[in-house]
Amino acid sequence: MNRDETSEAPSTGDSTAAPAAGVPAAGDERLVAAFADGEDQAVEAALRPKDLGEFIGQRKVREQLDLVLRAARARGSTADHVLLSGAPGLGKTTLAMIIAAEMAAPIRITSGPAIQHAGDLAAILSSLQEGEVLFLDEIHRMSRPAEEMLYMAMEDFRVDVIVGKGPGATAIPLELPPFTLVGATTRAGLLPPPLRDRFGFTAHMEFYEPPELEKVVHRSAGLLEVTTDEEGAAEIAGRSRGTPRIANRLLRRVRDYAQVKADGLVTRDTAARALAVYEVDERGLDRLDRGVLHALLKLFGGGPVGLSTLAVAVGEERDTVEEVAEPFLVREGLLARTPRGRVATPAAWAHLGLAPPRQSGSGAPGGAGQGGLFEA
Ligand SMILES: Nc1ncnc2c1ncn2[C@@H]1O[C@H](COP(=O)(O)OP(=O)(O)O)[C@@H](O)[C@H]1O
Ligand SMILES: [Mg+2]
């Protein structure tokens, strides 16, 4: 439990290992990874909705944001600072760009890890134009001194630039033009309250429902000039883990398959066959996820089993199992983390098409009830 808050541990401290655009740790090359890879970054610009009307799903966030922006426009002022929180791939960067577009304002894009020193932030802030949107991605990874400078900038549109060192150092106040800060974070819980409190509006992005993802797939298919029927789009949506970025990526792989093997038409059958090639199953589990479940069920009778033991059985690092595979399995209700170890739910047995072991008295797993364990 003491490790729960540190699932991005490798990326705090020094930022040498982390590419500027994301926090891909282990498992970032998976087709179902939620972080953007190089190919995503190239394609995503073309797929991003340009205004709120085009943005699919997230109805509440859209409604609230629409009001915030309309009111600001009506007053002729800059919009309040906005915090976007949610899992990777749900549309935070897209929304930041939409905010700028809706306000007809320029946007400056940077990220927490790119701001090492307060001076870096001062340089950015002091070069903002009036009304500009400053998008600070991964805002929870900003350094402490920069964070403190940001408090004042957000509240009073002012920074103190420190000149000189030691006892002779002086703070020179610098007025800033009014601007809108849009912060994005995957870990709203890691933001210090004083920072959180300085946002006028916080949007919590939820995972998308299948019908919404179908719309995303249809929209992207149109832009990529892929012909997709209803069922084909539904098949891709169902495997996308509630995440538009994954939906778009799966669509591209299915498109490749359809072009080579199916005259370019994406039907349910083409989508299912294409994604079988890439080992993404009906529920969006990939090889790693299934490997973890399979070990948990077949080797440990569904658990409880300790994380380290499970990781060894799968042949993966402990962190990979815990941070890459488990979150989605937990979210899907296939695996539970208990004080005694990892436990499979009945849904996990059903998903892998296995029969759960018969409960034999108070027997420990792997005891007398083992009969049913190794069949199927
Ligand atoms: N609501 C949405 N409607 C349509 N496409 C979306 C939506 N949200 C995200 N996307 C698509 O998903 C991809 C990832 O979105 P992005 O804004 O980069 O996510 P985040 O910044 O939260 O990781 C983009 O290509 C974008 O086109
Ligand atoms: Mg982003």
Image (cartoon, rainbow, N blue to C red):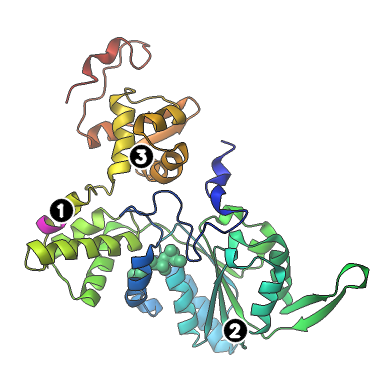
Report the front residue among 47 and 196. Answer: 47
The verdict on label 3 being within 8 Å of ligand 1 is no
Q: Residue at x 46, y 70 (%)?
A: 93
Q: Quadrant of the C terminus?
A: top left
Q: Residue at x 42, y 30 (%)?
A: 342
Q: Spot the residue most to the right.
A: 167
Disc on the earlier residue, 1 or 3? 1
Element at label 3: loop
Residue type for callout 3 = Gly
Above/below status of 20 relative to 286: below
Q: Circle 2 sits on which residue?
A: 78
Q: Is residue 187 left or right of residue 364?
A: right
Disc on the earlier residue, 2 or 1? 2
Residue type for callout 2 = Thr
Q: Is residue 269 left or right of residue 126?
A: left
The verdict on label 2 being within 8 Å of ligand 1 is no
Q: Position of residue 284 (x, y in %)?
A: 28, 49
How many numbered marks are there?
A: 3
Above/below status of 313 relative to 93: above
